[in-house]
Image: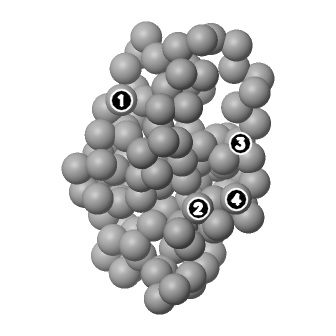
Amino acid sequence: MEIKTHIINNTKIAEIVTDELIIQSAQDSLDLLGNIYYQGFDRLIIYEKNMTPDFFDLKTKIAGDILQKFSNYRMPLAIIGDFKKYESKSIKDFIFESNKTRHINFVAVLEEALENFSK
């Protein structure tokens, strides 16, 4: 796992770059949060491919458990991916509502994630 550093307005942003599945459970998200926080990062960018596919099946409640950790520890998160492929109305609504809070963002490309973090 590589952690790329981006700095915008004196805010240190971690971008996780790997082909591995990094987050499969709420505990995995806590471990990642601890690692990122320890290294002095203020925000996190991760890719859809690095998250368990169960995250996008809201019936599993994994998405809520994972995102609650990021909210509790006040670590803004951007998830980059192609979310148009999800046909479930509930996941589309979930993504829409998450993006309104600006704490958790689902975006298509890295530039969009960085732009959101610059506001």
Three-letter amino acid code at the position of disc 4: Glu
Residue under numbered circle 3: 81
Residue under numbered circle 4: 112
Crowding near the residue tagged with mark 4, few <14, some 14–19, many ≥20 C-alpha atoms within 10 Å: some
Residue under numbered circle 1: 64
The residue positioned 55% from the left and 53% from the top of the image is 78
Residue under numbered circle 2: 116
Three-letter amino acid code at the position of disc 3: Gly
The residue positioned 63% from the left and 59% from the top of the image is 113
Precedes in sequence: disc 3 or disc 1: 1
Three-letter amino acid code at the position of disc 2: Asn
Foreground of the two, 2 or 75? 75
Determine the secondary structure under disc 3: loop
Q: Position of residue 119 (x, y in %)?
A: 53, 69
Precedes in sequence: disc 1 or disc 2: 1
Q: Position of residue 85 (x, y in %)?
A: 76, 23
Please say if 89 is above or below 30: above
Q: Is residue 69 visible?
A: yes
Separation of residues labelled 4 and 2 (CA atoms): 6 Å
Choose mark 3 or mark 4, whichever is in front. Answer: 4
Marks 4/2 in contact by CB < 8 Å: the verdict is yes
Precedes in sequence: disc 3 or disc 4: 3
Q: Is residue 3 left or right of residue 76?
A: right
Determine the secondary structure under disc 1: helix
Determine the secondary structure under disc 2: helix
